[in-house]
Image: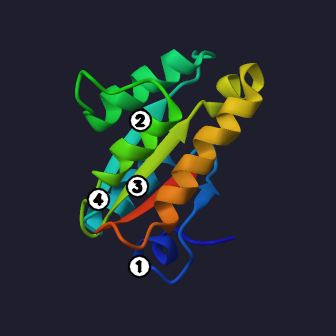
């Protein structure tokens, strides 16, 4: 299992990771102590694309004109460049994954691509619960 500290310090590769049910407070505390911005998505009751994009827009503070599609998400994430990094903590993704499995996989691919983007300042990691 990869430790959160390894992720935050860059000793583990960027990407998407899972964390346990009882670890959200610990994750938040460790990441914030390391100077990271923590963005929390809770989509436990959301099964639609537009619903997920609305939560993403609000959590990141994306502008009102943010488009509810994959291209807009990818573009907006390039502007997320907090240093040393941004940690996206996504809880409740299973409802969306069950309702829209293909689109959920595509959203995760966009998040992974942003994590692997070495041209944008600040690291980007995603934790799924």
Q: Residue at x 60, y 15 (%)?
A: 48
Q: In whole angstroms, how far apart are the C-alphas of marks 4 and 1?
A: 13 Å
Looking at the rendered image, the quarter that the N terminus falls into is bottom right
Query: Is label 1 in a helix, a strand or a loop?
Result: helix
Query: Is label 4 in a helix, a strand or a loop?
Result: helix
Q: Look at discs 4 and 3 and give the one toward the viewer.
A: 3
Residue 7: x and y in percent read 50, 72
The residue singled out by tag 2 in the image is: 72
Residue 32: x and y in percent read 29, 59
Residue 23: x and y in percent read 53, 50
Query: Is label 3 in a helix, a strand or a loop?
Result: strand
Viewer-proximal residue among 93 and 114: 114
The residue singled out by tag 3 in the image is: 87
Q: In whole angstroms, how far apart are the C-alphas of marks 2 and 3?
A: 19 Å
Within 10 Å of disc 3 (Cα), the crowding (few <14, some 14-19, many 20+) is many
Earlier-in-chain disc, 4 versus 3: 4
Q: Tell me, yes or no, if residue 106 can be seen here.
A: yes
Viewer-proximal residue among 3 and 102: 102
Earlier-in-chain disc, 1 versus 2: 1
Q: Look at discs 4 and 1 and give the one toward the viewer.
A: 1
Q: Which mark is drawn over residue 32?
A: 4
Residue 38: x and y in percent read 34, 50
Q: How many marks?
A: 4
Q: In whole angstroms, how far apart are the C-alphas of marks 4 and 2?
A: 27 Å
Within 10 Å of disc 2 (Cα), the crowding (few <14, some 14-19, many 20+) is few
């Amino acid at each position: 299992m990869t430790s959160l500290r390894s992720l935050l310090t860059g000793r583990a590769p960027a990407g998407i990771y899972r964390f346990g049910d009882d670890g959200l407070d610990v994750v938040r505390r460790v990441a914030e102590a390391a100077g990271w911005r923590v963005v929390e998505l809770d989509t436990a009751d959301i099964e639609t694309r537009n619903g997920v994009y609305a939560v993403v827009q609000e959590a990141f503070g994306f502008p009102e004109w943010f488009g509810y599609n994959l291209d807009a998400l990818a573009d907006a994430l390039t502007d997320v460049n907090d240093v040393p990094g941004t940690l996206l903590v996504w809880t409740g993704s299973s409802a969306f994954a069950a309702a829209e499995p293909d689109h959920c996989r595509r959203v995760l691919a966009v998040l992974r691509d942003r994590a692997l983007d070495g041209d944008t300042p600040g690291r980007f990691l995603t934790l799924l619960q």
